[in-house]
Image (tube, rainbow, N blue to C red):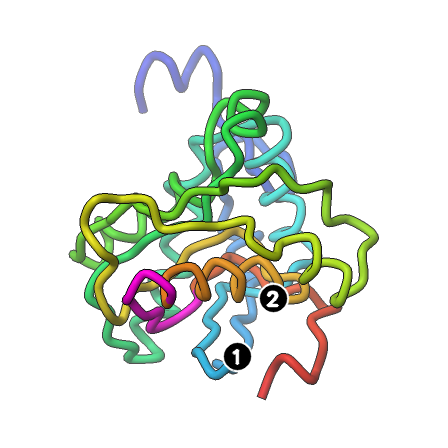
Amino acid sequence: MSLLDLLFPPRCGGCGAYGAAWCAACAGTLRPPAVSTLAGIPLLAAGRFDGRLQQAIHSYKYRPRPQLASVLAPPLARAIATAGVSLSALTFVPLHPRRQRERGFNQAQRLAAQLAGALGIPLVSGLTRVRATPAQVGLSQAERRANLAGAFQWTASQPPGDRLGLVDDVCTTGATLTAAAEAVAEAGGSIGAFLVLAVAQTLPAVAVT
């Protein structure tokens, strides 16, 4: 244990207990959902967006506690390994520059960096949110899709590759992931899997097969 840990002991992002950033009790509550598909693409998650995982994601994004990426990524890495999905590299859902300045970091990017290290594959940047969009909270699936139409573009000089893993923190209706995947496809690449910390209970059955 470092001197910094003695002076400022870590608190669990899930329950708030002192001693670890993600305690064993909270880790034990995770129940990875079965692999499903969204727009024909495998969707993998570390757990459901409820309970201790939901609290940890809220702490990660809004307190904010960006260091939680290092303890939240391993459960997702294990879910990916269990699924046996073959990916060439990872990329991530971008924030609009104004939103990223407000938050101070991109939670999907930090998570993707941790995952890339755990999986031993490259992390590539290229997706850009070219249009600021209103908050998605409270919108229906159709409204979310309309809200995100044309919001993403692949702007890197190098084209995207095939079988990229697209990383985000939560999949609620799938609108953000599918809009980003469409931008990758328009640039000549393909998404091999959607990778998220949590899948919301509200994810429409029509989107998951």
Q: Is residue 59 magenta?
A: no
In the image, residue 23 sits, relative to residue 159, either above or below, namely above
Residue shown at 57%/38% (left/top)?
13
Would residue 22 appear left or right of 188 to someone viewing this image?
A: right
Q: Is residue 191 magenta?
A: yes
- Where are the magenta residues, as a range? 186-194
Pointer 2: what residue? 174
Would residue 107 appear left or right of 84 to someone viewing this image?
A: right
Contact, CB < 8 Å: mark 2 with mark 1?
A: yes
Which is more toward the observer, 119 or 126?
A: 126
Would residue 127 appear left or right of 45 to someone viewing this image?
A: left
Pointer 1: what residue? 39
In the drawing, what numbered circle is on residue 196?
none
Q: Amino acid at mark 2?
A: Gly
- Residue 146 position, x and y percent, is 70, 59
- Residue 111 position, x and y percent, is 40, 45
Residue shown at 49%/27% (left/top)?
10
Quadrant where the image shows the C terminus:
bottom right
